[in-house]
Amino acid sequence: MLGFRTITLSLLLSSAIGMYAGSKDIIVDNLGNEHNFVHINPVSGILLLPIEDAAPEGDVSFVQGNKNVLGHTFKVRLARQKVDYYLPVDLSFCDSEPIKMFVNGVPPSSVCWKEISFSDKFDKENIEKFRPVYHHTPAYGWMNDPNGMFYKDGVYHLYFQYNPYGSMWGNMHWGHSTSTDLINWKNEGVAIAPDAIGTIFSGSCVVDHNNTSGFGKGAVVAFYTSAKQTPWGDCQTQSMAYSLDNGKTFIKYEDNPILTSSEKDFRDPKVFWYAPKEHWVMMLAVGQHMEIYSSKNLKDWKKESNFGEGQGCHGGVWECPDLIELPIEGTKDKKWVLICNINPGGPFGGSATQYFVGDFDGTTFTNNYPEETKWMDYGKDHYATVTWNNAPDGRCISIGWMSNWQYANNVPTKQYRSANTIARDLILFKQDGNIFLKSEPCKEMIAARKGGRLVKSINVAKTETISLSPQSDNGAYEMELSINPGKSKKVSFALLNGCGDKVQMIYDVVKNTFAMDRNNSGEIYFSKDFPAVTEMPVGKSKELKLRLFVDKSSIEAFVDNGKFVMTNCVFPSEPYNMIVFENDGNRYKINNMNIYKIK
Ligand code: FRU
C-alpha cells in the first residue's frame, strides 16, 4: 500500500452537508502524470465531491469489476486550491460493493484529495441566499433548458438540462422534477444519463395514448439529442427513450440514434401529435433554421420541410423550437406559433426567444409576418422556452430558463446554478391588425398569494416611499399596480433595499415603453454583460397595468397580464423591501397597489 493515504473520516462536516455517519474508508492513490485511483469501500451513503469552479475539468469514471459502472466518463472540476462547494454522489449504484474512482487530470497537490468524504445525507436547505422560493431550481448542480415537459394523471413533469457533477455547464443529463401546482416542485433525481452515443441534450416528451410506438398504451416517449464532443468536432444525433412508469425511469430505445445528419448544430427535438393528418411532427433546430419531420410510429421519421431562411432574427444559432396552435383572445380563430430560441442575437445581447405567427398544415409552417421579428420576452433572462405536452383543460403552458448564456456560468450562486421562470399560460391577442403572443402568469400564481395588502390609491405629487414589508421580508412576493400617468410624460419608480441596491423602472408615456434598469441592483460585476437596461413596447393605454413577480434573485414584469413581458435576474444584498415613486413635477396616480407574499 506504499504511496496510499488512508483518510478515515469522522469529520464534522459543514452545516450545509450534514454529519458523517459511520466509519468508512477512502484511500487515495496518486499515480504519476495526474492520474489517480480513489478506492472507495461504501456500504451505502453519499460521496461528497469537493468542487472548485475555477479548476480545470478532470476526467472521472467509477470502476467496478473493470467496468465503467455508469457507462460514461464525467468532467469534474475537483478542487485544487480551495473548495467552493460539495456535490453529492449517491453511491447506491454500487450495490454495496467497493468501487474505484479513476480520476485523470487532477494533480496530487489538489485539496480535493484531503476533502473528499462520505456523508449520510446532503442538505440543500439553505446555504444560498439567492435560491428562489417559488421558482423551480435544481437541488444542486447546474441547470439550463427545461426539457420534456408533460402532464399526466394530475402531475406536471419537468425535466431539465442538468449537470449533477458541478454548478457549471457540462455532463448533460436530464434532471427530473414533478409538481401538482406548477409552483411546489419535488426533486426526482436524474431521469436520463449519458451513454456511449453522447451526453443528453435538450428535447421533449409525448404521451403515446394510442400506442403508435408499440412501447405500450400511455407510454411516455422522450426525444433528446445525443451530443458527442470530440477533438474532431461535435456530433449531434437524435435519440429516444420510453417510460412505462409515468416518467420516473426511462428505457433507451435499442436502435438509437433515430435521426442523423452531417450538420454540426442539429438538435432539440420537439415532438407533438398533428390530429388532422394523424401523424407525429418533430421540430428540429438546425444551424439557423428549423426542420420539420413527420412519423406514424415515433421511430421512423421523414423530412417534410425547412423554415427560417430570411425570417426573423439571425444573430445567432437557432435552438429549442416549439410549434403550437393557440386561440386568439376574444375570437373563435386560431393560429400557429413557432417558438424559436436564439443565441446570441437577443435584443439586449446574448440569448432570447423570438416567435413567428402563421399557419401549419402538418408538414409546412408559413409565417404570416415575414417582415417582422417578434420577441416573447424583453428581459435578458428568458431562454429555451418550450411548452407542456398533454396539458390539461386545453391549456398551453410554457416555462423558460431564467438566465442568459452570456453569464449563466458566472452568476453568484454556488451549490446550484439557475432557476426557471414561473410557468406561463399562452394565448394570442390582436393589436392594430397584428397578432401577438400573450404570456400570462399561470393561473396557479393567484392561489400562491399569501397575506395581501392593498394600498388603494397613491397620489404622487412628491416622491413617495412605501414599505413592502412584511410581505417582502422573505424576498418572495408579487406586486400588482395600475399607473395612471395623468400629465406626466415619464413615470419613474424603483424597488430598493436599505443597502442602496435599486432596480429602476420607467414607464415612458410618450414612447409607450417600459424599462428596467439593473445597473445598481446589487451584485453585478461577475460579468460585463450583466449590467443592463432592458426596454419593451407596452402599447397605448390610459392606465398601465403591471404585475411584478420578485423572488430573491429575479424580477418578472407582466404588463396587461402578459401582453408584454420582461424577465431579469438581480442579485441584491438584501430583499428589496421598499418602492419609491419619483415625481417629475406632474402628478400621477398609482391605483390598487396590492402586495402579496408568495408561498
Ligand atoms: C440551449 C442549448 C440547446 C442544447 C442544450 C445543451 O440552451 O444550447 O440547444 O440542447 O442547450 O445543454
Image (cartoon, helix red, strand yellow):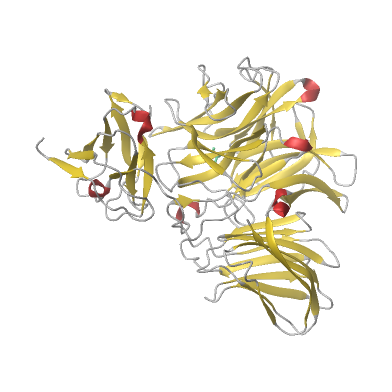
Q: In which quarter of the image is the C terminus?
A: bottom right
Residue at the extreme right: 331
Q: In this view, does 145 lie above or below 302?
A: below
Q: Say which quarter of the image contains residue 505.
A: bottom right
Q: Please tell me which residue is depicted at 90% across the width and 43% down the height of the picture.
A: 331
Query: Looking at the picture, how far across and down is residue 49, in whole percent?
Result: 33, 45
Q: Please tell me which residue is depicted at 78% across the width and 42% down the height of the picture.
A: 357
Q: In which quarter of the image is the N terminus?
A: top left
Q: Can residue 588 be seen in this view?
A: yes
Query: Looking at the picture, how far across and down is residue 283, in whole percent?
Result: 66, 31
Q: Is residue 442 visible?
A: no
Using residue 95 as the reference point, say whether residue 328 is left or right of it.
Answer: right
Q: Please tell me which residue is depicted at 20% across the width and 49% down the height of the picture.
A: 109
Query: Looking at the picture, how far across and down is residue 139, in whole percent?
Result: 48, 46
Question: Which sits in the foreground, 186 or 243?
Answer: 186
Residue at the extreme left: 2
Question: Which sits in the foreground, 262 or 593?
Answer: 593
